[in-house]
Amino acid sequence: MTVTETPARTTHTVPVDGDDLDVWHVAAAHDDLAGPAGRPAIVMAHGLAGTKDSGLAPFAEQLAAAGLEVLALDFRGFGASGGTPRQQVSIARQLADYRAVVAHARGLPAVDADRVALWGVSLSGGHVLSLAAADPRIAAVVSLTPLVDGLAAGRHALAHHRPTAMARSTALGVASRVAARRGRPARTMPVVAPPGELGALTLPGCVEDYTAITGPTWRNEIDAAVGLELGSVRAGRDAKRVDCPTLVQIGDLDRSAPPHAAAKAAFAARATVHHYPCDHFDVWPGRDWHAAAVRHQVAFLTRVLAPSTAAR
């Protein structure tokens, strides 16, 4: 592991399967949540094709201000992290990346290894449920506007997209998979594009909503097979095996991640649930429901990760 410093945070390099993850570490601002073994930590990552410099910093900084050690990662193939192929979503690889950073967090001198929590949004909001179901040491979960069921997401998309547009992206995705199996470069498409054009997210307003938060390492490009990969998401099924305190935050008008599937997963996980009368991107910095979403995260995490609570 290597560590570099900036005025606001340190950057850690965490190895995983021969590649390096680029991880921001935002230190806790105070010791209010500290116990004999150290302070609680939370590991966070972005959603579909997102990078940590695309809107994660305000969440991380406010959680650190509440007394948590915060580690935010770029998945392999995205942002500042290493790994090839680039711009390709792999559920299995992203889960492995989370696990590597959790292990890294547990080894930090300032961190209480038994109070490491997970934070995810959109696609990674489903990841954190699957990870917590498999790791009983996870202390808490925050799942923000999560995508938890690929099949439900596909049906949800049909209600908001033209069937011809979905057929075009599916055909390109199949072509990309075939090319990869033959050792050829993947076929790509934009992450976001205007309605009627080819892209992973093409609902009205998506281009403006997504690019409003994107940072310098983000690229508007993704392996076209992403739709096929998302079809395998079954995080909702894992939710019933989550035993740690869990917060699920649902946008009731979410056009990208089906809110009814998120509600079912929350019920299965016996989660604390907050509903917001908003769309998928309205919980991000600069939007109407960001302050409420962060306030609820801070209240939940400071309660369930307090030393006296975690020791029970």
Image: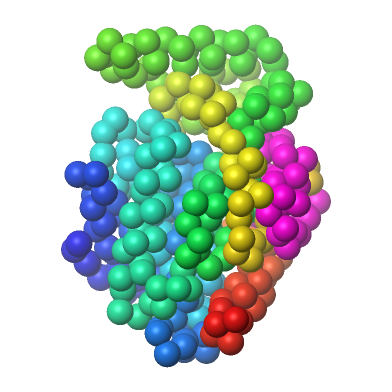
Q: Where 225 sits versus 28, above or below?
A: above
| Side of 71 where 295 appears, left or right | right
Q: Where 123 sits versus 225, above or below?
A: below
Confirm whether residue 217 shows in the render: no
| Side of 138 where 160 appears, left or right | right
Image quarter (top left, top right, bottom left or bottom right) of the C terminus: bottom right
Residue at 65 percent across and 9 percent down: it is: 164
- Which is more toward the observer, 107 or 31? 107
Residue at 26 percent across and 39 percent down: it is: 83
Residue at 47 percent across and 65 percent down: it is: 137
Residue 211 location (% of width, % of height): 52, 42
Total labels: the figure holds 0
Q: Where 32 sits versus 203, above or below?
A: below
Q: Is residue 258 magenta?
A: yes
Start-end of magenta stretch: 255-283
Residue 36 location (% of width, % of height): 42, 90
- Residue 86's image quarter? top left
| Side of 170 where 222 appears, left or right | left
Image quarter (top left, top right, bottom left or bottom right) of the N terminus: bottom left
| Side of 186 where 264 appears, left or right | right
Q: Is residue 274 magenta?
A: yes
Residue 246 location (% of width, % of height): 64, 61
Residue at 41 percent across and 43 percent down: it is: 94
- Residue 169's image quarter? top right
Residue 48 location (% of width, % of height): 50, 39
- Which is more toward the observer, 276 or 193? 276
Q: What colouring style does the render use?
A: rainbow
Confirm whether residue 237 shows in the render: yes
